[in-house]
Structure formats: structure tokens, C-alpha cells
Image (spheres, grey):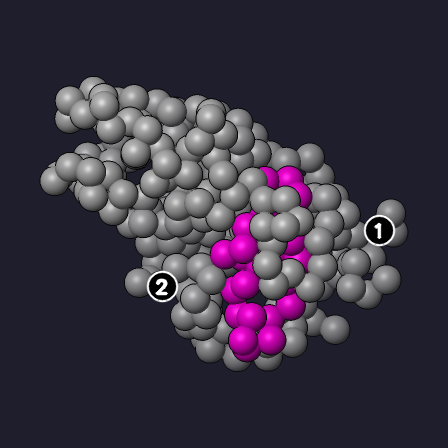
Amino acid sequence: MNRILLYDKDGTLLNFHKLWTPYAKKCIDKFSEDFNVRHRKPEVAEKLGYVDGEIKANSTIASGTGSDIHAVFESIEKGGGKWAKDFYESNLGMLTDDMELIDGVKTALQHGLSNGYKNVIVTSDSRDSTLRFIRKFELEPYIFDVICGDDNDYHKPQFGFIKDFIDKHGYPIEELVMIGDNAADTLLGYDEGLYTIGVLSGTGQREHLAGADRIVDSIKDLYDADGKFILDA
């Protein structure tokens, strides 16, 4: 069977906590300083989903697009949205340096290629950041395409986020599998019958992965020792 495997990036392919948790703290601290709203830091953190030094599952910062995150800052102070966008873009180099692959990613992607599957990254992050990620870890040979948070006006789990991609290639929904660590991933295409696999390598635990048809610990569990995909075993 032909398969198109749709991989979320952060928390599925990329170590989410190592990258985004320190960035969230740095961003909130700098925003509160630049706008002189230190007294509102807990409010900003709560709205983003950064609580008690951790990023909560299914929160804005865990699964939202850049626009969603910028809107939080704008809701605190006028001009905050542009500030957040500029801050993110000015820190892309640092973020790229801090990126770390989750164990087993290249092996899983290679198994996909060996089985004749297509590996696609479907992420709420920006295209710039996603391409930096691919280049840093030399994933170009493994990745068929990418769908990013700034490519269209939709956001996961809205089916419109991936509909243009599906229509462009004429893929039947039965050939697609979405893999990710948040409900935004496991509920993607729920009404359309898209099969989804939740992974526990990011911010979500089992109770956070609504709609998942299956849940595994990490990308390493998608294939057996012989390279056979979990749904074909």
C-alpha cells in the first residue's frame, strides 16, 4: 500500500523541550522588560501555555502557529504581536543552533523511503525555521514535502491546513497517516477519516491526544526491527 506519512516537527522529529522551553522563558522575560509590563508576566505565560517552567500540552506555544503566538502578545500590549514576530526572527539563528533530533528519526525516515512511502513534515512552525531544521540535519533526501504554519490561513487541526497538498497530488485519504504529539495533530482530518498516531515524545501525554487511532512512545516505535511499518505488521 502506498503511504504518505505526515510528521509533525516539534516533539515528533525535534526535541521540543530542549528548544522551546528556554525560548519561551527568554521571550516572556524580554517582552515584559521591553513593554514595562513585568506585573503581567504570569498572564502572558498562562496565555501561551508556559506554566511552572513547563510548556503545557495543546497550549498556544505547543501547537499554535506563529500568528497564534503573536496574537497573545498583541492582546497584552498594542504592538506586542509585531514585537513577538521580530523577536522570533532575530532568534532564528540561536534556535537553529539549539535544535536536536529525537532519537531514531533518520532511521524511521529511511524505513519510510525503503518501503516506498513519502515523508512529509506538517508543522505549525514557519517555513524558514522548518527549512533550517531540514538543512541542519541533512534531511533533504528523506523529505518529500513540507507544509508550514505560514503557508496558508488555516492551522492544525483544521483540514484546510493540508487539503491543498492532498488535492495537488490526488492522494486518497486512506493513504495518509498523521503522526504528532498534540491534539492538533491527532485531530487533524478527524471528520475526514485521516488515520492519526500520537507520540509521547513531546508535550502530550495519552490523555492529551484526543482522536488518536494509536499511541506510541516515539517515532522509533513506528517500524519493527525489519523496517515494517506499524500498521502493516
Asked if the stretch drawn in magenta spans residue 43, the answer is no
Q: Foreground residue, 5 or 67?
A: 67
- What residue appears at the point 52 percent right and 43 percent down from the top-left corner? 57
Which quadrant of the figure has residue 102?
A: top right
Which residue is more in the foreground, 199 or 142?
199
Number of the front mark, 1 or 2: 2
Residue 181 appears in the figure: yes
> Residue type at mark 2?
Tyr
Image height of 100 relative to 106, above or below: above
Indicate the position of residue 80 as horizontal and vertical percent values: 18, 37
Name the residue located 71 percent from the left edge and 39 percent from the top edge.
104
What amino acid type is highlighted by mark number 1?
Answer: Asp
Q: Is residue 89 left or right of residue 149?
A: left
Q: Which residue is mark 2?
A: 154
Q: Which residues are magenta?
A: 179-202
Q: Position of residue 209 (x, y in %)?
A: 60, 54
Q: Nearer the viewer, residue 132 or 186?
A: 186
Please tell me in which quadrant of the rendered image residue 228 appears. bottom right
> The residue tagged with tag 2: helix, strand or loop?
loop
Residue that carries the numbered disc 1 in the rendered image: 224
Q: Is residue 195 above or below residue 108?
A: below
Magenta stretch contains residue 201: yes
Which residue is pictured at 77% across the width and 47% down the height? Answer: 221
Residue that protrudes farthest toward the left in the picture: 78
